[in-house]
Image (cartoon, coloured by chain):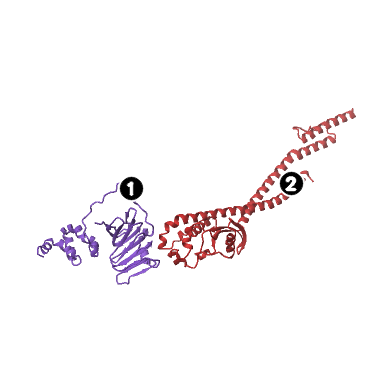
Amino acid sequence: MGDVIETGPNATAQAQLEFAGSAIVEVGPSTQVYVFSQSGTGREIILLTGWIKGETISGTYRYLSPRLSVETNGGNVLLHATEKSVDAFVERGSASVTFGSGMATTSSTDKLFFSNRVSQPKFSSGRPSADFVAEMPICFRDMLPSRLPRFVGKSVPKPERDHDVSYTEVERLLTLPPRWRKGLVVRFKSRLQDRGFRQAIEAHISTLPEWKSALDPEHQQSNAGPGR
Amino acid sequence: MRLIVKFNLVLCAVFIIVFVIASVLANSLLENNAKAEIEGNARTMIEGARAVRTYTSTQINPLLKTQLTYAFLPQSVAAYSANEYFKQLRKKYPDYSYKEATLNPTNPTDRATDWEADVVRLFRDNPERPELVDERDTPTGRAVYIAMPLKITNPACLECHDTPDRAPRTVIEQYGSSNGFGWKLNDTVAAQIITAPMRVPIQRARHALIAFMASLAIVFVILIIAINALLTLLVTRPVKRLADLASQVSLGNVDAPDFPTSGSDEIATLAASFGLMRKSLIKAIKMLEG
């Protein structure tokens, strides 16, 4: 099950994911990323909110978001997601871009920037919008240097348990499109013991139907009993 | 006319002749030296600009390449770096000016004027020629310039100057797609030209000449004073005293004191001979009286 990486709001709060030999992914400030799947030659990384820049060296990388997804085999891709919009820019190389669940478009000289915003028509252009460039973390303007060699031979501190997640903290993750929710109920079921978490799930049960069995396992079992 | 006056007149005449000849020769020599120094400075400045260009295109440009996707950064352009480098130099050398005169530039401010275009064409027609040094008239007076050809030897330069399709979009947005393209590898596309007004070497030569001639005059004055002092001390004063003594002896004053002699110079020899003559004269007078 994939890791969820979240950065703080400070401008310097960033994280870098390095998939040795295949890609470097920079996570900007105020960003939530979910490493959805990893195979030998590729990854699927879901951007829940914020900024990511992915430099793919080899393999197939899919940078996903509910409104827009980008797949590349060797390009640099930037994604910016907010609640109401997703913008993507193919900085180098080529990529295949899909608006929602529509048809994929291959990037070209005139189609490098893609935007999908609420109540606005989807569009693509050869240049990133001025807003996109202005809001982009400044370090995203450069090539991403590999930092992995710095940690060779050094003991890396293990992450420590800080606190149990609240519903608000994982709401974006739990409300992803159903095809990306695989395993989330099992992962966070134990949090139902927390009253606040449970109440939040119950309040949003109409959009989280997969949680019904976890909320009331006995009822579900009796419904699924013999003869039914 | 007194001997010392004659001496001084001759020395002054010789000094004036030497002064005029020295000033003419020194002026020409110093002017040539000042020009050579300016040319040397200009060569060093051009080599410096070349070094900055190479540094920019091999080290800075690759670092900014990704950033060029988002915004045009003049710092990634070799010509910009060279001009910025020269801007700093001009703070110390305000008389010098620098231009990368280009036949087909991306930035219109680099476009070669008529005479600059001729210089670039000269380098194109004579690829082996390393530089051109010449003078030209300008509205502010005569100027000396040194020019060196700029050849495209780094294929990376062609990314922005080959075809508009290959150039970064941000460059096209900044300068359009009609200028600065069609360059070829090993083409002479521009000339680095450093110009300095002629008054600069002339002023330098004049200052040096004034200092040199003043030194020469001071040396001559010291020489005249020394010669006059020596002439008075060693020649005119002893001769005058000897002449006074001779006058006294000629008037029959045989008791006049002897002329003190020391050394072996011509005055001492003359005094010794005078002493002998005086003794013989006294002896002859005494024989006549006896």
User: Are discs 1 and 2 both within one chain?
Assistant: no
Residue at image position (17%, 63%) is A211
On the picture, is B281 further left or further right than A15? right
Disc marking residue A210: none
Instruction: Name the spot of residue B163 as percent of width and height, x first.
Output: 47, 65
Callout 2, which amino acid?
Answer: Leu
Q: Judging from the image, what is the letter of the chain drawn in red?
A: B
Left or right for A198, reference A69: left
Q: Quadrant of residue A132?
A: bottom left
Provide residue B130's location: percent of width, then percent of height. 58, 55
The chain carrying label 1 is A
Which callout, 1 or 2, points to the residue nearer the camera?
1
* Image quarter of the C terminus of chain B: top right
Q: Colour of chain A?
A: purple
Amino acid type, label 1: Val
Q: Residue shown at 71%/41% (left/top)? A: B229
What residue is disc 2 on?
A: B11
Residue under pointer 1 = A152
Q: Is there any visible trace of residue A134 in the rendered image?
A: no
Q: Chain of mark 2?
A: B
